[in-house]
Image (cartoon, coloured by chain):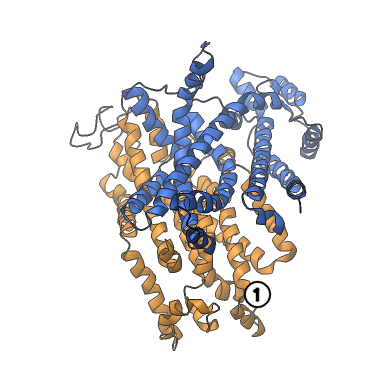
Chain colours: A blue, B orange
């Protein structure tokens, strides 16, 4: 089977499985959100300070909030079929635009955090497996368990105390200097300075996971025949570790990384709160508080798609890392 | 998640740990090359009652000989002690004002950990906070485990269209970002300790269900299950008395990590202002201290240390349990 057919097959299978999942997400969330007391009209009226029955009714009928439940669901699905995520009563703009504004910030944060987590995790995990059972391994094991136990919002605040309040090295929040017009390398550094603390606090938990996983996978692979063969061929231990062991250990790690995309989005809600980072997680929280369910449905749907997409990407990566995987399916 | 993955590995060796039910129905090793591992057990095979005891003791012994696990147990005992004695030492409401605000730790011996911006005793808050965290952690895990095992067992044991349907449901829950869903549910249901607990259980059961399903699918094919079926045992009896005891080791390991996760989620929720407003919790103390982080950072640091301490103890125990219940896996490590 050629590589292209394999990729095509994987894509076809994934998209066929994705349709009922996405549909289920929309239906479940739609009914879940209807259980909430109050709607966007209540919050809008509450913030305005005063509203008559007539204004409330006008707001409701303008956004279709007074229709029967099934009609509302049908309208939403109809919108989706036209690739529209609906209109937010609270922000007064299409949900797709709103999400489009916030998505890049969160995606950037997640990608940087994931990259930090995987690189550090692989490094620590390899180190642990090389020294398996000896002192460095035990020390690092305890450390990784410690990272695993620290809540991200707390380590975020502690990093602010250390690096922003005491040392004054890094900014304590936001995503960029207001009115700054630096470009080029200086501009990138400027952005990175705002990125370091949030990405580190988000990554720390996952560093622990990947380190432990790398260690377990590398020890498992080390005992296999092809590693002995490679050693018998006279390859140096470094080449064996990097090219034969680490490459195979990447398979469980990429699987986990794909599964963590959803979890990271949840973590981003908290970290974005700590660092007042203008992202999707923050938007989701504001939408819950403002009873802006169109926005919330849009975010939940989009993040579901993001997870499915990430998993598909991981499947493809596996087919490249390990040719046997594509053959089997 | 990792623990799940690790346990998936471990699950295969987990079935080798002899529990009473295995003792009865699985007299011969399936894997001849593991003969030497099983040999010590064959001596006690004469009596089922006797066989059960050494097994349990062995797990306990392995746990006690593991320094990390012992540390975890001691830490956890301290936290439980704090939760128990909190109402005795500080019988009053921990949310009541007792002294001048912003006393730093050590400034006044009557308030060893200082007071916050409203003059509330920080130590009283931390001790009382242990009660909420442990309650939410334990009850949410118990609920999530029960539901997850029921769903996973049904899916794994029966297979067919039931399996397809339940797996689809698990997948839907695992595709949605769980913390966002948690925030939505708690905001909808009004935050109280019990709604938070229930919401955490709702988002954690799919992990257990997935694990239990994988275990049940493997064990269902074993000879002793076939034997039980041919004896005419009902489905319920086979599921709960034959398969479940053999599927337990990885589930037990997951449960201690789940308690840790539930405590972390509860603290994150109350940090964001979605905690029970009538009880003091570590997360809400951090949330309140956050505004004053430049001047009084101890208000943020101290409750956080309590969280890390508790969660670390549970993770250490989980690690120790994993080593104790899956000896083959440990040897390879």
Q: Chain under label 1? A: B
Say which of B137 and A244 sits in front: A244
Say which of B145 and A107 sits in front: A107
Q: Is residue B319 above or below residue B61?
A: above
Where is residue A212 shown, x and y percent of the image?
Answer: 45, 51
SS type, badge 1: helix
Q: Is residue B38 above or below residue B188?
A: below
Where is residue A250 shown, x and y percent of the image?
Answer: 55, 49
Location of residue B26 by image quarter = bottom right
Say left or right for A101 vs A243. Answer: right
Q: Residue at x 73, y 24 (%)?
A: A57
Residue B47 seen in render: yes
Q: Residues within 10 Å of mark 1 (few under 14, many from 20)?
A: some
Say which of B181 and A185 sits in front: A185
Say left or right for A152 vs B235. Answer: left
Quadrant the C terminus of chain B occupies: bottom left
**Residue sitting farthest toward the front:** A234
Residue, disc 1: B235
Say which of B122 and A303 sits in front: A303
Say left or right for A178 vs A146. Answer: right
Q: Residue at x 43, y 62 (%)?
A: B322
Q: Residue at x 19, y 37 (%)?
A: B110
Say left or right for A128 vs A320. Answer: left
Where is residue B146 shown, x and y percent of the image?
Answer: 55, 61
């Amino acid at each position: 089977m050629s590589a292209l057919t394999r990729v095509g097959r994987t894509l076809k299978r994934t998209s066929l499985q994705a349709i009922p999942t996405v549909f289920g997400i929309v239906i479940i969330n739609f009914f879940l959100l209807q259980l909430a007391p109050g709607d966007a009209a209540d919050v809008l009226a509450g913030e305005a300070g005063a509203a008559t029955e007539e204004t409330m009714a006008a707001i409701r009928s303008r956004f279709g909030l007074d229709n029967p439940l099934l009609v509302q669901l049908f309208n939403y699905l109809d919108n989706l079929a036209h690739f529209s995520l609906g209109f937010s009563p609270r922000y007064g703009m299409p949900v797709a635009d709103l999400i489009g504004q916030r998505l890049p910030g969160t995606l950037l944060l997640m990608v940087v955090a994931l990259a930090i987590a995987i690189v550090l995790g692989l490094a620590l995990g390899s180190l642990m497996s090389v020294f398996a059972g000896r002192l460095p391994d035990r020390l690092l094991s305890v450390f990784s368990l410690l990272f695993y136990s620290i809540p991200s919002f707390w380590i975020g605040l502690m990093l602010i105390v250390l690096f922003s309040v005491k040392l004054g090295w890094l900014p304590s929040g936001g995503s960029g200097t207001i009115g700054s017009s630096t470009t080029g390398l200086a501009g990138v550094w400027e952005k990175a300075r705002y990125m370091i603390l949030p990405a580190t606090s988000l990554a720390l938990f996952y560093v622990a996971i990947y380190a432990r996983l790398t260690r377990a996978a590398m020890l498992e692979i080390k005992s296999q025949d092809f590693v002995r063969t490679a050693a018998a061929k006279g390859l140096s231990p470094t080449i064996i570790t990097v090219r034969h062991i680490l490459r195979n250990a990447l398979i469980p790690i990429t699987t986990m990384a794909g599964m963590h995309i959803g979890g990271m989005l949840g973590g981003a809600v908290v970290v974005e709160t700590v660092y007042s980072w203008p992202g999707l997680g923050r938007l989701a929280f504001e939408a819950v508080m403002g009873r802006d369910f169109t926005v919330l449905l849009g975010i939940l749907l989009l993040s579901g798609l993001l997870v499915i997409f990430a998993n598909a990407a991981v499947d493809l990566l596996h087919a490249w890392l390990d040719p046997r995987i594509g053959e089997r399916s | 998640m990792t623990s799940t993955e690790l346990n998936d590995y471990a699950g295969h060796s987990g079935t080798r740990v002899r529990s009473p039910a295995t003792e009865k129905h699985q007299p011969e090793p399936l894997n001849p090359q593991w003969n030497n591992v099983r040999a010590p057990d064959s001596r006690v095979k004469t009596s089922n009652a006797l066989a059960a005891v050494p097994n349990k003791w062995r797990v306990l012994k392995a746990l006690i000989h593991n320094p990390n696990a012992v540390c975890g147990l001691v830490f956890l005992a301290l936290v439980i002690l704090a939760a128990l004695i909190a109402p005795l030492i500080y019988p009053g409401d921990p949310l009541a004002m007792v002294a001048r605000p912003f006393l730093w730790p050590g400034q006044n011996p009557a308030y060893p950990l200082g007071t916050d911006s409203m003059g509330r005793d920080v130590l009283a808050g931390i001790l009382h906070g242990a009660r909420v965290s442990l309650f939410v952690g334990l009850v949410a895990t118990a609920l999530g485990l029960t539901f997850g095992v029921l769903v996973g067992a049904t899916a794994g044991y029966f297979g067919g269209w039931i399996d397809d349907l339940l797996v689809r449901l698990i997948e839907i829950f695992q595709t949605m970002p769980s913390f966002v869903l948690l925030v939505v549910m708690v905001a909808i249901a009004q935050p109280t300790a019990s709604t938070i607990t229930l919401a955490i259980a709702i988002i954690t059961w799919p992990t257990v269900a997935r694990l239990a399903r994988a275990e049940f699918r493997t064990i269902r094919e074993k000879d002793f299950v076939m034997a039980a079926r041919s004896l005419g045992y009902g489905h319920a009896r086979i599921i709960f008395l034959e398969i479940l005891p053999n599927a337990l080791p990885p589930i037990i390991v997951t449960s201690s990590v789940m308690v840790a996760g539930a405590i972390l989620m509860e603290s994150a929720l109350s940090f964001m202002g979605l905690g029970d407003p009538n009880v003091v919790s570590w997360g809400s103390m951090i949330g309140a201290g956050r505004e004053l982080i430049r001047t009084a950072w101890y208000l943020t640091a101290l409750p956080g240390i309590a969280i890390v301490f508790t969660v670390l103890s549970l993770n250490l125990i989980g690690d120790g349990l994993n080593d104790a219940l899956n000896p083959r896996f440990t040897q390879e490590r």
